[in-house]
Image: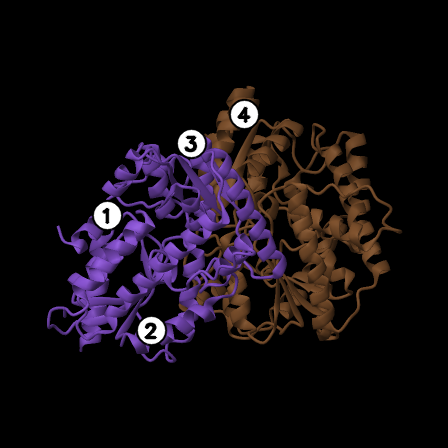
Chain colours: A brown, B purple
Amino acid sequence: MSDYKGFQFKTYDFSKQLDTHIDLIDLLHNTIGADLKKRPENVRWLFEPVQQYLDELAALRENPDKLVYRHFTFAPEIVYAMDCISYVPEALTFMMPTEYLCALVDEGREMDVPDHFCGFLGGVTAPLLTGRLPKPKAILHCNQPCDNSVAWGSVLAESFPDTEMFILDNPYGDDEEGVRFAAEQLREGFNYLERMTGKRLDLDRFREVMAKSAEAYRLMYEINEYKKAIPCPIPTSSILRPISVAFYALTGTEGLVGWLEKHLADTKERYEKGTGGWREEKMRVVWNLSWPIFDYGVYDWMEETFGAIAVAYHSAEPFYQPPDIDYGKASYEELLRALALRNNNHAMGRQGRGHFMTFVNDTLKWCREFSADGAIFAGHWQCQANWAAAQITKEKLMEELGIPMLIMTVDQLDPRVVSAEQMVSRLEPFLEMLAEKKGIKP
Amino acid sequence: MSVLERLIEYGESNPNVEVEEWKKTGNKVLGYWCSYIPPEIIHAAGALPYRLRGMGATGTDKADHDMSPVCNCSFPRAVLDLAHRGKYDFLDGILGMNGCDHTRRAFELWVERLQPTFSHFVYVPRTRKQVSVEKYAQELEKLKTGLEKYLGTEITGEALQQSVDLYNDNRTLLKQVQELFKKDRPPLTGTQFHHIINASVSISPVRLNLLLRELLEEVKDLDGPEDDKARLMIVGWVGDDTMLHRIIEESGGLVVMDNCCFGARAFWDPVVFDSKHPLASLGRSYLDRTGCPRMFATFNERYGMFQQAVGDYRVDGIVRTRLQFCDLHGVENVFFHKRKEQLGVPMSAPMVLDYIGQDEGRVRTRMEAFIEQLQQ
């Protein structure tokens, strides 16, 4: 039994009453943004997507008329195509210091926000309902991936009663009918944005955005091919935050394409040199669903103690295969279809909106393609639809690939639900079992 | 046995003797998950629509194998548990939909694990956009085709019209029973009415109309006991379990109105049917009715209903509830909190409930305290 007590996880002091009536965008831009800029030159590029998103939020001050609220699984390309600024309020929780997140969650609970609401959405409910977030010109919302998102839509409607919302009904099926249904609605979405922002859709701009989006996905698929190598040149855990920001918020932008090109070059170089991540790879796992944003030290512990590398992750894998069309000449209909496909295959949304077998099959695919020794289902305690797929996933993995899956509970953002130490106490016996199976000494 | 006793027995039993009688005629019984699956279509196909309920479950351990008690709601777990134990073997098929994440997954797991003879999923949009209404009509068309194929029958326009009329009569009569609670001394208790509502989704609509007419005739001139009970409205409760109603009424309250899944919301609005566009009009009517929280941003519609009810039914207090892990009803507690001064009647703090009722003692303490507070 290894001694994880010697390993330092983050500690938090929740005894202080923080002033949460502050400008959250300012807080993030000044603290996180400034911190990122201080990182050494050779690793700073890794954080560019986070910086890009923070800069876009900061630009809202000068361009309040461009502010469009967007649900985190509504494809951002639609907003970029309209030359607006895509603002995902719930993403603030993803970037803010944990103490602030927890204080905001508590403030929400005093307003009767259910105590089972995840930190992701629960953390910004209070600022929204008390008018501390900027008023949008338009709101794009959708019903994937979970009921919490539907409830979140009601919070938005309550917070901005005078702002008409556009709500996308995400389809259940993955067939062409589902794509057509989404495309028809996205057409209405553009009409809505034109009406609300007073801007006209420029077809060339839409073409450009979709071309960049397709390029981003092409690069990501290429990077993923290299990541299948042993040792994995870039463990997923080391870039979880930027890659998630990138694919949830920045697809369709030049900045993302530029970043992915650097990412690919770095991955390729490391692959060619046979370089792995920070530590020696002894086994590899697929990390499914949620990860502890409040403490990445869990991955360091896994790598250091067991040489267990998380090579694939639910929100960092590409699912969308952009249609093979000439984006420079594509018709509006073709672009709408591409956007609908992109939207239907949005990470999390794809697994949450439809039948549970999508979740099961995606997990099987990653485990197979990345030659995983085991899978870890870190179930965000609010992800009810995915939780109801966990047991079946576990059974199918064993039946088809002969590999085990650990099922455990986390809250992605709030360590008071499950701390890093508690996670480790669940991970340790599982990784010990994998190590024994592979004949590895931790 | 009086007609009231008979209806209560139907509501309490899962299944009830009416189902057994129906099966004896050789006709099929199809279970459906949510009120957004129109029973009119199932009935027009010659089958008995039977709304899935958790009544009779004493635990959820069989269902918990797949649906985690960490975050999955106890109501669908109770239903799924009954299915695993063979209590739903009398069904000839099941119909699921995306009512909420929990019931959607419970349906899928039922199909995966138990492989019923017939199953069909209806995708129901959560908005009323024209394109969504059209999509729902297409889904209803698929349901119709699926039923026709499975049951070897044709659902004619006349049959559908007839079923719509029958179910609209059900709704009208249930509303008349509801209105008895406007009286100072209603002849029924809220618990009894909740049983009747449960019966209404598990027996033939023809039979229900007969029983409700008879009941109304029997009780319309009666008065309930002379006591000073706190008149309460329940909001947020999802299940068919009458535990909450019973506890409230044993604690000195009277449930005069609700806004629950197995409650007034299910029968409040009649279906507006256009025989020229049968499925489109049926779909439009279902999406347009006073919405469930599964429909996006519809709280204000329900709130309007609450405001009206507070006056009409002289409500003394509102019992706010939600099942544990229910996001959709859960978030509405926030909106109530914001409006607590507007409604002009006290509201309980949100009461988080477990469907199986293992926490009856806690609920009783909370309800007794709330009612005492109202009576002071």
User: Is residue A427 at least partly visible in the picture?
Assistant: no
Q: What residue is rendered at 55% in x and 19% in y?
A: A439
Counting residues from the start of the chain, the first of labels 3 and 1 encountered is 1
Residue B145 in view, yes or no: yes
Measure the C-alpha gap from mark 3 to mark 2.
42 Å
Which residue was labeled with disc 4? A403
Crowding at mark 4 (Cα within 10 Å: few <14, some 14-19, many 20+): some
Disc 4 is attached to a residue of which chain? A
Q: Residues within 10 Å of mark 2 (few under 14, many from 20)?
A: some
Image coords of residue A392 (percent x, y): 48, 32
- Asked if the residue at tag 4 contacts the one at tag 1, i.e. Cβ–Cβ closer than 8 Å, the answer is no
Q: For the residue labelled by badge 2, is the local secondary structure a helix, a strand or a loop?
A: helix
On the rendered image, what quadrant is the N terminus of chain A found in? top left
Q: Which residue is mark 3?
A: B116
Residue hosting label 2: B309
Q: How would you rate the neighbour count of disc 1 (Cα within 10 Å): few for under 14, some for 14-19, many for 20 or more?
A: many
Mark 2 or mark 1, whichever is nearer to me: 1
